[in-house]
Image: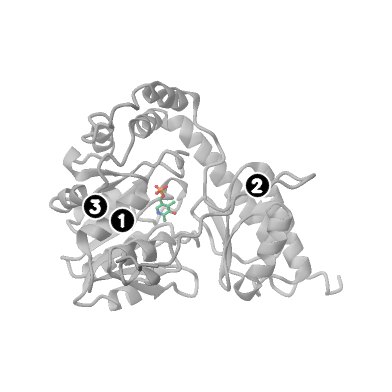
Amino acid sequence: MTELRLRADLASIPNYVPGKAPAPKPGIEVYKVSSNENPYGPLPSVLKRIVDTAQGVNRYPESASQHLIPALAERHGVPAEEIVLGSGSVETVSQLIRATAGPGDEVVFAWRSFEAYPMLVRAAGATPIEVPLDGEHRHDLDAMVAAVTERTRLILVCNPNNPTGTTIDATALERFLAAVPHDIVVVIDEAYQHFNTREDSPDGVEFFRRHPNVAVAHTFSKAYGLAGLRVGYALAHEPLADSLRKVALPFGVTTPAQHAALASLEAESELQERVDALVAERERVLDTLRGQGWSLPESQGNFVWFPLGEDTAAAAEIFEEQGLMIRPFAGEGFRATIAEQGANDRLIELSAVLVERGLTGGLVGGLVSVHSPE
Ligand SMILES: *Cc1c(COP(=O)(O)O)cnc(C)c1O
């Protein structure tokens, strides 16, 4: 067999592990809580726009996006030139990486964080620099500053962080930006910003307005529930914004996706009710788990993180066996999306099973144990 002339560095690119889809199980309802998807289907007004615009899919999408970009610019109070669409904010992050970094360059981010970061950096030929989270599963911003070298081209800050749900605070971010050389682009990935209720957390757009080297990545996949349509965007100053347009996938955001995004902005208060309900469920779940004895990191996303370490695989097996498809990271922990109430109730029940079986990664104190007497 002839060996094809593929890139020599492909072996270094990790494969993306998608959230497991549920396999049907007799007698129990199976829930997919492995991809941080929104459990609610599209609002009728959004669905109508998708269907209406589907009439025109024999035409290429409008790449200048005459409707969505001005609407986003207005909402954020920035010029339209500073908005760049992406096929999901994964593509937005990819554009930011490819516009700044190539072979020999470094991209700094916290780890563990969004699984796509190392892949996208490697795919651009650049080198990922993974800076371990601190003991509370938060970004270690001082260590991230210390990781900056001559070769650093981009820094990714995920707030709230996927998969831990932790946040950074605005004062710490300000200090961080003062310490980082001002010619390095710093991206704030706010995929979960709508679920973040912490007052001390930075508003990425506000930081963007004040800092010429800050860019922000937003998505319609999570709070707006459009994961299947693929639409996200960056806020970036010139000339970065123009560079993003150069490396963007041509026609990367379809017309139905653009219009569904626009219809979602128009339906924002209805969507906010759904976000509020998910946030209330997150707090109900976390409170109940605390009552079971768990000390888990506070989450500001639409998910919770169980840093179970070596107990992760056994715990994941129990959950999947019982129809709850969570997202395990072997040896570290698992992430469970806050979804429909039935899924959340199942999460609570199965967490109690983990306590019973002692599969808690040391996160449940000695007081709560079936082995100890009353
Ligand atoms: C889900 C997610 C995204 C973006 O997802 P898209 O569907 O590509 O918009 C970006 N960043 C983080 C941290 C995410 O978890």
Secondary structure under tag 3 reads helix
According to the picture, the residue beneath numbered tag 3 turns out to be: 208
Indicate the amino acid at tag 3: Phe
The CA span between labels 3 and 2 is: 38 Å
Indicate the amino acid at tag 2: Tyr
According to the picture, the residue beneath numbered tag 2 turns out to be: 31
Q: Is residue 222 above or below residue 211?
A: above
Which residue is pictured at 49% across the width and 53% down the height? 301
Question: Is the CB–ligand 1 distance for label 3 below 8 Å?
Answer: no
Residue 138 x/y as whole percent: 44, 67
Q: Residue furthest front?
A: 1
Q: Is residue 245 above or below residue 114?
A: above
Indicate the amino acid at tag 1: Ser
Secondary structure under tag 2 reads strand
The CA span between labels 1 and 3 is: 19 Å
Which residue is pictured at 70% across the width and 48% down the height? 345
Secondary structure under tag 1 reads helix
Which residue is pictured at 38% across the width and 59% down the height? 158
Q: Is residue 246 above or below residue 173?
A: above
Say which of 91 and 337 sits in front. 91
According to the picture, the residue beneath numbered tag 1 turns out to be: 94
Residue 200 x/y as whole percent: 39, 57
Q: Residue furthest right?
A: 373
Q: Is residue 231 above or below residue 210?
A: above
> Residue 327: which disc?
none
Residue 306 in view of the camera: no
Check contact, mark 1 vs mark 3: CB within 8 A: no
